[in-house]
Image (spheres, rainbow, N blue to C red):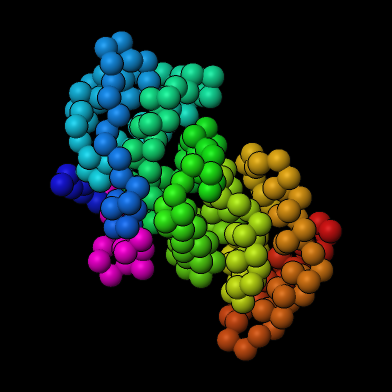
């Protein structure tokens, strides 16, 4: 196995034995892993466009691609390569590109499960949108159950872990771009008693000016998000959280700012 050294400013992109995601990641490698796609001479896919990296990665299992290898391929495949050689997005996505993404999916799942900040710049969301649908069509019942379990754990972690680098809205954005049904994800988030704390962490920051739901969403998604989160009931949940025993002064301030933001946005 190829090992990558942890950068001091970046989380490891491997999931350890004690991590709640460990069993799911191992199941993903066991059930979703595919052989590396074949590349014919003159192949113009995103991987072959970087010939040096393609030669280096030839025959390497998805598990053994490093974080940088995956990120470089995603950036090139999504048309945003750092060297300026982006290939223009969906207009040039080929069957081979789709096969490479499918091959890398277990490793992408591990990177996300590790909490690495690979999705914060939107590259993963763009790639998920390009290579979707990741919905139930085309997957076996077993594989789709695994993908649903992954999405559920990711939303749960985003709601509950204040140190997790992907907030709940960014997580919903990424998953909905990839084809996971947004309705089921929203129902999970709304039923979680810790959702007000998660929204307060995100929307209650002093001086925040960004949109409530940034980025490009599937058709109808922003309305569904507003119907779920921008409501008098959610403002009431925020105020109840602000006044609850055990809520710190900073958390109270953020919760009240968030409740006020929601009421003004209704």
Q: For the magenta stretch, what is the residue range? A: 7-24
Question: Which residue, as the protein is rendered here, is positioned at the far left?
Answer: 1
Q: From where the camera sits, is residue 133 visible?
A: yes
| 173 or 68: nearer the viewer | 173
| 32 or 4: nearer the viewer | 32
Picture coordinates of residue 63, whole percent (x, y): 25, 46
Quadrant position of residue 21: bottom left
Q: Is residue 223 left or right of residue 12?
A: right
Quadrant position of residue 50: top left
Q: Is residue 73 magenta?
A: no
Q: From where the camera sits, is residue 50 visible?
A: no
Picture coordinates of residue 114, whole percent (x, y): 36, 56
**Mostly what secondary structure, the magenta segment?**
loop
Above/below status of 39 relative to 243: above
Picture coordinates of residue 151, whole percent (x, y): 49, 57
Picture coordinates of residue 149, whole percent (x, y): 46, 61
| Residue drawn at x 69%, y 52% as measured from the top left | 212
| Residue drawn at x 77%, y 75% as measured from the top left | 236
Question: Which residue, as the protein is rendered here, is positioned at the far bottom?
Answer: 245
Q: Is residue 140 left or right of residue 90?
A: left
Number of numbered markers: 0
| Residue drawn at x 70%, y 73% as measured from the top left | 238
Q: Is residue 65 left or right of residue 232?
A: left
Above/below status of 259 relative to 130: below
Question: Which residue, as the protein is rendered here, is positioned at the far top?
Answer: 42
Q: Which quadrant does the C terminus fall into?
A: bottom right
| Residue drawn at x 28%, y 70% as measured from the top left | 18
């Amino acid at each position: 196995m190829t090992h990558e050294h942890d950068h001091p400013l970046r989380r490891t992109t491997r999931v350890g034995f004690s991590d709640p995601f460990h069993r799911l990641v191992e199941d993903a490698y066991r059930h979703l892993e595919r052989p590396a796609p074949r590349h014919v001479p003159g192949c113009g896919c995103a991987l072959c466009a970087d010939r040096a990296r393609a030669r280096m990665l030839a025959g390497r299992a998805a598990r053994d691609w490093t974080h940088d290898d995956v990120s470089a391929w995603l950036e090139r495949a999504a048309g945003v390569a750092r060297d300026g050689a982006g290939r223009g997005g969906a207009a040039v996505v080929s069957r081979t590109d789709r096969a490479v993404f499918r091959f890398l999916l277990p490793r992408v799942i591990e990177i996300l499960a590790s909490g690495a900040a690979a999705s914060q710049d939107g590259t993963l969301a763009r790639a998920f949108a390009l290579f979707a649908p990741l919905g139930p069509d085309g997957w076996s019942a077993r594989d789709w159950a695994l993908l649903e379990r992954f999405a559920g754990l990711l939303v749960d972690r985003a709601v509950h872990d204040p140190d997790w680098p992907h907030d709940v809205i960014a997580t919903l954005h990424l998953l909905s771009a990839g084809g996971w049904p947004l309705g089921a994800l929203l129902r999970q988030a709304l039923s979680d008693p810790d959702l007000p704390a998660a929204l307060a962490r995100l929307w209650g920051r002093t001086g925040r000016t960004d949109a409530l739901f940034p980025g490009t969403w599937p058709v109808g998604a922003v309305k569904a998000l507003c119907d779920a989160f921008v409501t008098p009931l959610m403002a009431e949940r925020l105020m109840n959280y602000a006044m609850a025993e055990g809520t710190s002064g900073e958390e109270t301030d953020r919760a009240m700012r968030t409740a006020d933001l929601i009421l003004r946005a209704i």
